[in-house]
Image (tube, coloured by chain):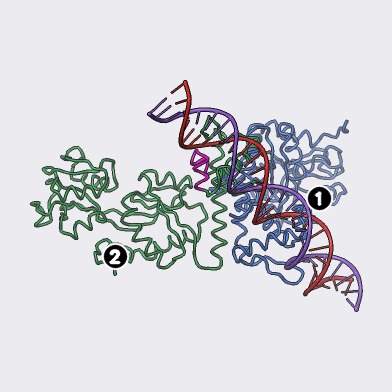
Chain colours: A green, B blue, C red, D purple
DNA sequence: CGTCCTTGATAAGTGAAAGTCATGATTTCT
DNA sequence: AGAAATCATGACTTTCACTTATCAAGGACG
């Protein structure tokens, strides 16, 4: 029966598309990788990689075997996790995928709180494109994801994790700054800064504005930037106003460089969910994290918010 | 990372509850089995078996690890199957669970036909209690089952395989024998032979008789026997009449020892289904067998019937 | 066009580990 | 009590997986 470590070698080699790099990742010699792959190829008379000169490329057969191979490794990992956690101290890896902003603001706070209770767990956050999270969950490439998008599917389970608010932020010397209120229609006269790609923040905002018959193309978008921090900076410098999530704006607000403005009648909330594939045994750490998120939601919300606005020097 | 062969040793040892027997099944020395188990126990500091004198017993922890372990092995087997089948000649194992009667009459005919096309596949039939088939399918202990019971479940897929008929059979010198017909009510005056446990045949018959307001307790059951062949024998000897499936009665009918009788207005048919767990990758052999059953249903039905009544000596 | 660098294959050598055999300890059955 | 069975243990053997060293072949580049 084929060896698990050999399978791992195959998997990594396939992902890297390069034996030398795979060897580095596996802490093995390049020779060992070659030999492992050849061992499978010989044993089953299958060509896994097509050798083209100095490089290798996964063959069609190799490609076809990948999902099943992943499945084996996944099952083995799970078993190992079970074994390790029998005696106790919860340990193991906790892989969570999320969007850039959640990865920056939400996860650090959340995970550090989790680690206080379970120090032997090693969380790993993987930042992925917003719209590929569910795709990756479904294909079992990742076990858990954090996103503001809700997704109905028989194999996906979602649970609210964090209540985020979206604000319009304006420069501190902006006319709206004093009273902190404006009407949706006021937006039309303003220069607005947006994200280049469609972000969750943007989507939520546009959704809410629809009720006031305001569509994206009616806005006067002066600038499009790649990330929310850049947007906040631009607002600080008076380029325009922007929709920004509470998480992102926290620092700027606390420093007084920007002010938040409420749009009358517009409720800009969005819930960030944690999602997982349901038909799927979980590692101990995953289960505990899920329960942790559920049981401590209120506390988490306030703690996260506290950590976002806390600028006390580290003792 | 833990070794697959070690896992297999654990699994077999757990199933056998005995290291020596496990060693035999694995073609290993008893010593090797001990060492393998101990290797896991040491590596993870877990007690898998409780040593009590000369015997061992799976511990609670060991029990808990079994399903996950099975899952790993299952995935590995599937991968291996994929590897083997790339180059094409379809090979591998084909495990099918079924009831005693299907195992005796249906499967031999069916599988021999399948083997003509795919000689490298090694079918294995496991006879299990009628009502545990779906249970075992759901827990993934078996990949496929053949049964006359239909079962609705999101993870179970059923497909009709064989159209069985149920007859009332009577001794050749029975008054009904000449014309081969009777009415349902006539049953009440007869001595009836039944199966001890509730069989599929019996269930179907009782279901059909309900329409004529005949319930099981109204029948005059003279004898209860353990298997359908015994019932047929008893009918031959004039003990009484009985409901028997076409498959089972075929031989007796062909020999003229018993006669079949139609109950007017009662349609005693039942369909035998083949079922599988759906959310589950299949081996090549499994997929092909499923397709085989689907595509050749009509032909299968006549062939099976032919084989059941064919008494030509083997050339 | 020749040189260098990178990448994969191959050969030889080494060491760890897994298996066997033989034996011991303990329990259970008769 | 003796015999048989069962698991643990220790010593020995062998296998095989990894490393190192080297080769061969492409690609990049001056």
Q: Which one is in front, B211 or A122?
A: A122
Residue tagged 1: B231
- Reply above or below: A19 against B26: above
- Reply above or below: C26 against B12: below
Is residue A199 something that shows in the picture?
yes
Which x, y percent locates residue B281?
A: 58, 43
Which x, y percent locates residue A156?
A: 44, 50
Is residue B289 something that shows in the picture?
no
Quadrant of the image occupied by residue B28? bottom right
Which x, y percent locates residue A56?
A: 52, 34
Which x, y percent locates residue B74?
A: 62, 49
Q: Which residues are magenta?
A: A12-25
- Reply above or below: D24 against B83: above
Residue at 39% of width from left, 62% of height from top?
A: A294
- Residues marked 1 and 2 touching at CB (< 8 Å): no
Q: Chain for mark 1?
A: B
- Image quadrant holding the C terminus of chain A, namely bottom left
Q: Which one is in front, D6 or A251?
A: A251
Quadrant of the image occupied by residue A295? bottom left
Q: Which one is in front, C26 or B59?
A: C26
Residue B156: which disc? none
Q: Do marks 1 and 2 both belong to one polypeptide chain?
A: no
Dominant SS of magenta comes to helix
For label 1, the SS is helix
Q: CA distance from mark 1 to mark 2?
A: 74 Å
Quadrant of the image occupied by residue A257? bottom left
Residue A302: which disc? 2
Q: For residue A13: magenta? A: yes
Q: Nearer the viewer, mark 1 or mark 2?
A: 2
For label 2, the SS is helix
């Amino acid at each position: 029966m084929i060896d698990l470590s050999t399978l791992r070698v195959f998997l990594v080699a396939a992902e890297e598309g390069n034996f030398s790099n795979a060897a580095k990742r596996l802490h093995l010699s390049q020779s060992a990788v070659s030999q492992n792959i050849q061992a499978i190829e010989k044993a089953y008379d299958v060509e896994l990689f097509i050798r083209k000169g100095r490089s290798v490329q996964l063959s069609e057969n190799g490609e076809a075997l990948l999902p099943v191979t992943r499945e084996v490794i996944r099952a083995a990992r799970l078993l190992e996790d079970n074994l390790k956690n029998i005696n106790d101290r919860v340990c193991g890896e906790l892989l969570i995928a999320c969007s850039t902003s959640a990865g920056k603001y939400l996860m650090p706070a959340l995970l550090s709180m989790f680690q206080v209770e379970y120090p032997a767990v090693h969380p790993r956050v993987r930042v992925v494109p917003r719209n590929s999270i569910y795709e990756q969950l479904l294909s079992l490439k990742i076990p858990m994801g954090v996103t503001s998008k809700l997704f109905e599917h028989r194999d996906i389970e979602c649970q609210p994790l964090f209540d985020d608010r979206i604000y319009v932020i304006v420069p501190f010397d902006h006319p709206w700054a004093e009273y902190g209120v404006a009407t949706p229609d006021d937006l039309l006269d303003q220069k607005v800064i947006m994200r280049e790609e469609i972000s969750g923040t943007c989507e939520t905002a546009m959704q809410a504005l629809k009720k006031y018959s305001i569509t994206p193309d009616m806005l006067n978008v002066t600038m499009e930037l790649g990330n929310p921090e850049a947007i906040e900076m631009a607002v600080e410098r008076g380029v325009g106003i922007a929709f920004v999530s509470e998480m992102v704006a926290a620092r700027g607000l606390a420093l007084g460089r920007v002010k938040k403005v409420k749009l009358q009648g517009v409720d800009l909330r969005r819930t960030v969910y944690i999602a997982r594939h349901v038909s799927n045994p979980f590692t101990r750490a995953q289960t505990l994290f899920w329960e942790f998120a559920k049981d401590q939601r209120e506390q988490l919300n306030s703690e996260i918010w506290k950590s976002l606005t806390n600028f006390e020097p580290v003792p």
